[in-house]
Amino acid sequence: MLAFRLTAAGATALQDVPVPEPGPGEVLVRVGAAGACHSDLHMIDATAPRHVPLTLGHEIAGWVEALGPGVTGFAVHEPVGVYGVLGCGQCAECLRGRENACRSGFGGIGLTRDGGMAEFVVVPARCLMPLGGLDVVRAAPIADAGLTPYHAIAMHRCALQAGSTCVVLGVGGLGHLAVQILRATTAATVIAADIAPDALALAKRLGAHAVVDTEDPDAAVAEIREHAGAADVVFDFVGLSATLDIARRVVATGGHLSLVGLGGGTLPVSPGGWTLPFEVRITLPFWGTRAEFREVLALAARGDLTTEIQPFDLADVATAYDRLRAGAITGRAVVVPGGARA
C-alpha cells in the first residue's frame, strides 16, 4: 500500500509499504480520508523527530477492513472515525476519561505510531467511533479540527451565556468549525477575525455575527471593541504573536482567553504590568476526550456542523502540505486515497 511517511528530520516520502495486520484488540481500517493538520508540519520541521519512520495523519475516517483477535462490537465495512489520542490508561486523568491530559506521556495515532496518510491503518479498537450515515471524507477532520475547538469551547461554556461575546481569531481548519460549534451550542455573539478575505467570507456564511479583517491589528482591535466592547471569551486558533497581542487587547477584565493555535508566538504575562486585564483566565486546550468526540460527531449528524474541505488524492499529499504551509487552504485539506469507497 502507499503511505506518506516522515523518514527523517525535514524529510518525507510517499512509499510502498506492506499492509499492516491488526494484533489483539486492534482493527485494520481502510482509510477513506485523512485531514492534513499544522501539527503534521511541526513534526516534519522538528530537528530531532523521536518516531521515524512514521506514517503521518491523525484525522482519520474510513471503514473497518479486518478485526484483530478479541475485537467485538464492529462489523467489517462499517464506517468509523478514529479518536487519535493514546493515553497510558493508568494515570488519574486517563482514569477520568481525559486521555488528552495523560500525565504519563502522550501518544497518538499519526504522532507516535503510524497514522492515516495511507491506504490502510491499524488502530486500537477503543479508538473507533461509529459514523452512521456521516460522509467519511467530511467526517475525518472532525477527529481533531472539530474535536479540539469543541473541547476548548466546553472549557469556557460557563462564560458563553446569553448576552456574552466571543472572538474567534483564525477561521482556518479549526476556526471555521469553532464558529459553527459556538452557534450550535452557545448563546454568545460570535465575532470571527482573520487576515484572509476567503476565510472571513466563510465565517460569515457559517453564521458569525460579525467578521473583522486583522491585516491592520490596531484597526482590528478597534473594530472588535466597537462590536463587543471587550470580549468575554477569546479563542486564538492561530497562536502567532500578532494574534496573541490582539487577543490580550480585546479580552475583558475577568474574561477567558483560550490559546489553541500552535503558531509559535508568545504572550507576555507580567502581574501588575498591565499586559493583561485582571482576573483573566488563560487555558491551553489540547485535543479532547472520547466522550467529546462522540458529542461533536452527533452535532455533525444532526446537521449543525459541516467541514469545508479541499480534497487531494494520496498521490498529491505533498502538495496538500505545501499549500497548508503557504496558507493557501480554506477550511481543511483532506487527503482521499484513490479508489476509497464503502
Image (tube, helix red, strand yellow):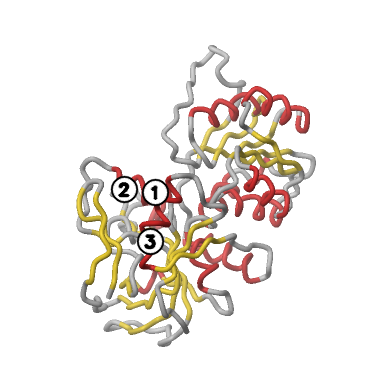
Q: Earlier in the sequence, mark 2 or mark 3?
A: 2
Q: Quadrant of residue 216?
A: top right
Mark 1–mark 3 CB contact (< 8 Å): no
Q: Residue at x 53, y 28 (%)?
A: 242
**Residue type, label 1:** Ser
Q: Which residue is mark 1?
A: 39
Please tell me the numbered disc located at residue 317.
Answer: 3
Of residue 3 and residue 103, the one placed in the foreground of this image is 3
Q: Is residue 203 visible?
A: yes
**Residue type, label 2:** Met
Q: Residue at x 55, y 67 (%)?
A: 138
How far across and how far down the image is residue 45, in percent? 30, 43
**Residue type, label 3:** Val
Q: Quadrant of residue 34?
A: bottom left
Please tell me the numbered disc located at residue 22.
Answer: none
Mark count? 3
